[in-house]
Amino acid sequence: MNISIKQSIRLCLVTPFILTLCQAQSGSISNEMLEKIQSSVQMDSYTRAMQNAVSNNDIKQLALNRSILTEVDHHFAYKIPISPITDQKSSGRCWLFTALNVIRPKVVEKYNLKEFEFSQNYLFFWDQLEKSNLFLEAVIRTRNKDIDDREVQWLFKRPVGDGGVWNMMPSLVEKYGLVPKDVMPESYNSENTSMMRRLVRRKIRSQGMQIREWHARGKSEKYIRKKKLEMLSDIYRILIISLGTPTTEFTWRYTDANDSLIIGKTYTPLDFYYEVVETPLCDYVMLMDDPSREYFKLYEIEYDRNRWDSQNWTFINLPAKEIKKFAKQSILADEPMYFSCDVGKHLDREKGLLAVDLYDYESVYGVSFNMTKKERILSYESGSTHGMSLVGIDTTNDGTVTKWLLENSWGPDAGNDGYLAMTDEWFDQYMFRLVILKHFLPQNVLDVLKQKPIILPPWDRMF
């Protein structure tokens, strides 16, 4: 029997199953609810003007709060002398650039240099090899677990990346040393990491699956570890071709501030590190402001390292108001710090400014976007996205800090000649990590380092 579409719809509407389904969807938007929602927005002259403006323009430009632009300048009472601004290009290596920028001012001062950079490419090469080994070892360790186990899923989802954090730099330097940038300069693929990262991940994921298959077939751990050496050789080959060959020995030639050519002695990378960098990297401590966790506690993030045999990322959780006290002392002593934050929040990239309410979205839309820092963390609205060096402060006559200066690694054309000015209020709201020398910390903070760390999983919302 042929029936029309209209008749079919009527039959469906009276079917008991459909009636039950409709009753079950009590949370859906009913016609009555939709009418109330629609009537709640009055298309007055302001709303109509904003609709015309926003639908045809960049929201950020329309929301830009010009009063804040005029309140915050780029003059600072105290600024640590540094070499020219660095540029990480199209890579996620801000952590590496920032960590090296923290220790390079002392080298410039020690050798009376006009400018100086350590080779980021040299350490990046070893970082990628070590992270590959970390992944393969983790796969071996979890080979008995189901492929849908959360830890195994996390490992295969993020096997190797170019991102990182402070603790990964000392881990590499202690094993491989340092070299000047001209000894191993950047390559196209160190500055544009996307394709190489994709290929390394593709290869190492297949290697991880091979390890699990060997285990399923009853192969011994000894056999698997022998095969792991061959796997790392393949990764090493990819890195050599993409990034260049790391040097094992070099003669350091440089021009000092007087334009005199200095030919130094021959170094290994480790010899260069021991002689040139006077501050032991183990003297730095990472602090963090995470109001979703208990303060004055020590935390450790599982798998957050690049070497299998090195320490996970460990930090002391402190309120921002405490961290700022220590940061001020460090700047006044000409000691830059590793600083990471949610850089995308209220950033004027062109003018180099970070200020709370720099973009007044509430006035544009007539709705509130207010959340506390804790709420932003717990809801995944905010987290650390970028690392920079903290190198300056501006103060009132009584010494109160009003804004902070960040040395960025986006090149000299980004921001204000490569720098970002950050208001003190923005520091409170969007700063997450700061690495500082131990001697700027009081004893009650140092005592936290004696605690047994609280272990956090690698898939924690903050990491």
Image (cartoon, grey):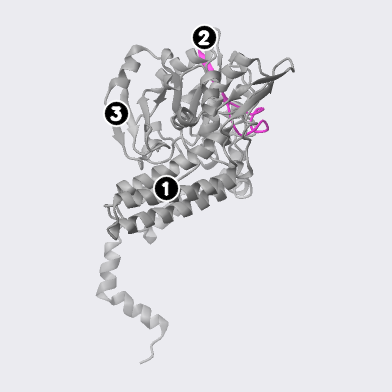
* Quarter location, residue 303: top left
Label annotation for residue 216: none
Sequence-wise first label, 1 or 2: 1
Segment tinted magenta in the rendering: 399-422
Does the CB distance between marks 2 and 3 fall below 8 Å?
no
At x 63%, y 32%, the residue is 183
Mark 2: few/some/many CA within 10 Å (<14, 14-19, 20+): few
Amino acid at dot 3: Pro
Q: Is residue 401 magenta?
A: yes
What residue did someone put label 2 on?
Answer: 399
Is 365 left, or right, of 84 in this rendering?
A: left
Farthest residue in the right direction?
259
Q: Secondary structure at mark 2?
A: loop
User: From the image, which quarter does the N terminus lie in?
Assistant: bottom left
Q: Nearer the viewer, residue 311 or 215?
A: 215
Mark 3: few/some/many CA within 10 Å (<14, 14-19, 20+): some
Can residue 263 be seen? Answer: yes
Q: Secondary structure at mark 3?
A: loop
Is 19 left, or right, of 309 in this rendering?
A: left
Image x and y of residue 48, in percent: 58, 48
Can residue 343 be seen? Answer: no
Q: Nearer the viewer, residue 39 or 344?
A: 344
Marks 3 and 1 sit apart, C-alpha to C-alpha, by 33 Å
Q: Is residue 179 magenta?
A: no
Image x and y of residue 425, in percent: 49, 24
Image x and y of residue 291, in percent: 35, 29
